[in-house]
Amino acid sequence: MMQNPNEEPLSVFDMLKIGVGPSSSHTMGPWRAGQRFLVQLQETYLLDKVQKIEVFLYGSLAKTGKGHGTDIAVLLGLSGEDPVTMDTQSITPKINFIKEKSMISLQDIHKIYFSYTENLHFCYDKTLPFHPNGLSFIAYIQPENSLSKDSLITFEQTYYSVGGGFIVQETTENTETVDNLIKLPYPIRTAADALHWAKTIKGNVSDVVWENEKVWNTEDNIKKKILRIWETMRDCIYKGVHTQGELPGGLKVIRRAQKMHAHLLASYNQENTENNDKKNADNHTNTPISPLFQNQEEWISLIKKDGNSFSKILRWVSCFALAVNEENAAFGRVVTAPTNGAAGVIPAVLMYYICFTENPTEDGIIKFLMTASEIGCIFKKGATISAAMGGCQAEIGVSSAMAAGALTERLGGTPEQVMTAAEIAMEHHLGLTCDPVGGLVQIPCIERNSMGAMKAITATHLALETNPEQAKISLDTVVKTMWQTALDMNTKYKETAEGGLAVNIPISVAEC
């Protein structure tokens, strides 16, 4: 029996999670599934009795799994690595070792034979009925007091990666009921609920979220955890604008954020800009460029001074978004917001708030992310945040709506205008397909984040000039429409690389 997702209380830190690219549903979810399988295996059997493990990837996880790093994620999860803390520079060496030695160390403590080609199965022609992103693990275990291989018993679990790094299991037993879930003082399932509670407490959407969040965390812990989310976003942008070269995967996509960043700050150091351009022309690896700044505070200060025109601000916002999703495509550390494929929108709009609006504050950053997370929760509960279920409207569209609502509140908008901004942003993403070329989170995904960020800013300023009482469409109506559109959308436009740009771009990729 599955828990009703519409009743599930979600924290800010469920919607905004620190992890590793390139995909929340195809990388983060399978990674977490591998970790959970080991935990369940340990609870049922002794880990050191495992003789063999097989992994089966179904549906979208099979069709675009290699391009999205699903194979890598599963192996890292079984190895006991954590996406929040793992040194991303060690990913490639660790995976190469597993492939070359045909050996994996479960939880980094029990070594078993594991062949990448024999034990990891891509089931291209089979999709499980519950969700397109399904994967199964089977462990073969040596029973106590038995040495015969014929007496091996099996332990099998199936998981579904439902978007945003969330995983669920379809089981016959319900181990957690709605009755014993955490009760929030201001439960929110719809935009109407959020507006009701904001009116009740005479506050903003972020104020309602703050009160709910205190059920899980102390006030100090909430602030620390949200600021860590922001710092991870900022670090990702900073690394992205200081790294040049070619993204992995076979498409030979060249990073652009570094060059754009250098040109935007050309007046700050013309010589360095010219030297970096020369290096970039010949470089085909992900190579860090030495920063020109004492620290990130100095860097942000210079951006604020530089962004003194519409053209400059537009280019800066695009640069921020590109930087994040180029890092995401290169297995860098990002914040799932609400997904990895859409990870650049919210950081780019948040940087816009910090660099190009009046009087941004640390408290404003915290409230920005709180409001954004709640709008994401509304979409997750009323529709989906999985591209495999709803196309890219469920990723870029949702992230744009989240960013628009958050920015609107920070610029003085009412709760009604917050929801209007989110509605406008999603309304103009309805029907957006997910058609990754080569099964990689690169084309059109990286540029699409820049477009989503700009739409969010546009939606904010439209909402601030709108009387919500005169609006013809509510956010809840758009959420409902988005879900209906998702159900009507042809499967080939849902993260399968079987339609759209993915079949019309004349680029050959060896494996996708």
Image (tube, helix red, strand yellow):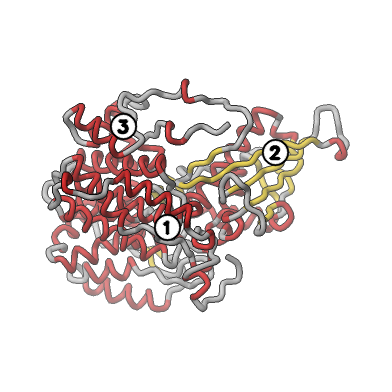
Mark 3 element type = helix
Counting residues from the N terminus, which is met first, the one under dot 3 or under dot 1? 3
The image shows residue 162, relative to residue 97, as above or below, that is: above
Structural distance between the alpha carbons of marks 3 and 2: 37 Å
The image shows residue 385, relative to residue 381, as above or below, that is below
In the rendered structure, find residue 222 and report the number of the disc placed on it: 3
Q: State the residue position of label 2.
A: 156
Image quadrant containing the C terminus: bottom right
Please state if 160 lies on the left or on the right of 230 as rendered.
right
Q: Nearer the viewer, residue 480 or 348?
A: 480
Tell me which residue sits at (32%, 75%) in the image: 277
Identity of the residue drawn at 17% across and 42% down: 361
In the image, residue 135 above or below residue 301: above
User: Looking at numbered disc 3 in the image, what kind of residue is underneath it?
Assistant: Ile
- The x and y percentages for residue 425 are 28, 54
Q: Is residue 94 left or right of residue 446?
A: right
Q: Please indicate whether residue 210 sits to the left or right of residue 73 in the image.
A: left
Residue at 51% x, 78% y: name it: 506
Q: Amino acid at mark 1?
A: Cys
Secondary structure of the residue carrying tag 2 is: strand
Residue 164: x percent and y percent?
Answer: 45, 46
Q: CA distance from mark 2 to mark 1?
A: 32 Å
Question: 10 Å neighbourhood of mark 3: few (<14), some, or many (≥20)?
Answer: some
Q: Quadrant of the N terminus?
A: top right
